Amino acid sequence: MKDRILKVIEEKIRPYLNSHNGDIEFLDIRDGIVKIRFLGECSSCISAKYTVKDIVETSLKKEIPEIKEVQLIQYMDEEMISMAKKILSKKILSKKI
């Protein structure tokens, strides 16, 4: 099933996301639940949850009826984690003073 998912992603989903300066990464499939991650502009888009349902899940279910759901797995890269730590440490230090 993984190969079928990757084919749909490559042919139908990725071109759409690329047109918005984004991309998609297939992570896993278990019990009909596909896990993905958005990359590029799509990773921080406020409409990401709609894109998952309207574009990704619809496209995959149309081609592969065994798919029950698509879940977007969010993550933070090291740069974003570092920035968040700096912001939080400044707020904590300013409250102590």
Image (cartoon, helix red, strand yellow):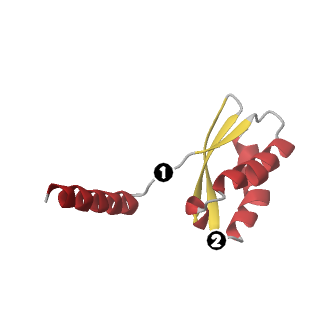
Q: How dense is the environment of label 2, judged by Cα within 10 Å: few (below 14), some, or many (20 and up)?
A: few
Q: How dense is the environment of label 1, judged by Cα within 10 Å: few (below 14), some, or many (20 and up)?
A: few
For label 2, the SS is loop
Using the image as rendered, state which of residue 71 and residue 93 is in the foreground: 93
Q: Position of residue 88 (x, y in %)?
A: 29, 57
Using the image as rendered, state which of residue 43 and residue 49 is in the foreground: 49
Please state, as top left, top right, bottom left or bottom right, where the N terminus lies in the image: top right
The amino acid pointed to by label 2 is Asn
Q: Position of residue 10 (x, y in %)?
A: 73, 58
**Does the rendering let one see residue 67?**
yes
Q: CA distance from mark 1 to mark 2?
A: 18 Å
Residue ID at (79%, 58%): 12
Q: Position of residue 13 (x, y in %)?
A: 75, 58
Dot 2 corresponds to which residue?
Answer: 21
- Decide which of tag 1 and tag 2 comes sooner along the chain: 2
Dot 1 corresponds to which residue?
Answer: 75
